[in-house]
Image (cartoon, rainbow, N blue to C red):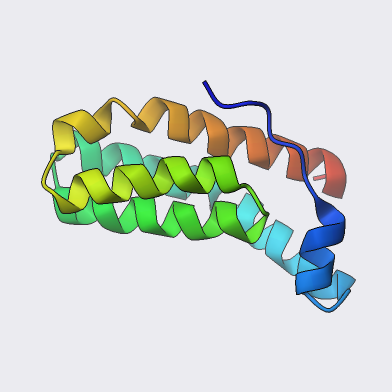
Amino acid sequence: MLSSFVLDKPSIMERLGDDEEIFSMMVAMFLDDVDNNCAALQAAVQATDAVQLQREAHTIKGLLATFSDDAGADLAFALEKQARAGEVAAGAAQVPALIARVQDVAGVLRRLSGR
C-alpha cells in the first residue's frame, strides 16, 4: 500500500527554476489529461495489449515523476517492466493501485490549484 502523496513543491520549483507559470501549466496539463490517462491504462489491460500497457505505464511514470512522486513512479515503472515482459495479467493486478495513486496526486493538485 502506498502512503498518501505529499507534494514537495519547493523541490519541484527548484527544478523548474522557480518558474510559477511553468508549474501552473504542468498542473493544468496533468489535470486535463488525468481521466484520459487512467482510461487508456484500463483499456490496455482490457485489450490485453502489452505494448499499449507498457506505453501508458511509461507515460504515467513520467507524469508522476514530474511531481516528485517517487513511490507512484516506481509503481508505474514496475508495471511498465511487467508489460515489457508480456506479463499483462500480472500487470493488470497493479493497475487499480496505480490509478488510485494518479487520482490521489490529481486531488492534491486540484486542491492546490483550486480547479
* 75 with respect to 7 (left or right): left
* 19 with respect to 33 (left or right): right
In the image, what residue occupies the spot 16% across and 38% down? 88
Q: Position of residue 94 (x, y in %)?
A: 34, 30
Outermost residue toward the top in this view: 1
Q: Position of residue 72 (x, y in %)?
A: 53, 41
In the image, what residue occupies the spot 50% across and 48% down? 73
Q: Position of residue 16 (x, y in %)?
A: 78, 74
In the image, what residue occupies the spot 44% across and 49% down? 37
Residue 79 is at least partly visible in this image? yes
In which quadrant of the rendered image does the C terminus lie?
Answer: top right
Q: Is residue 22 above or below residue 83?
A: below
Q: Which image quarter: residue 12? A: bottom right
Total number of numbered discs in the rendering? 0
Q: Which image quarter: residue 66? A: bottom right
* 67 with respect to 9 (left or right): left
* 44 with respect to 56 (left or right): left
Q: Which image quarter: residue 14? A: bottom right
In the image, what residue occupies the spot 76% across and 72% down? 15
Residue 40 is at least partly visible in this image? no
Q: Position of residue 4 (x, y in %)?
A: 68, 27
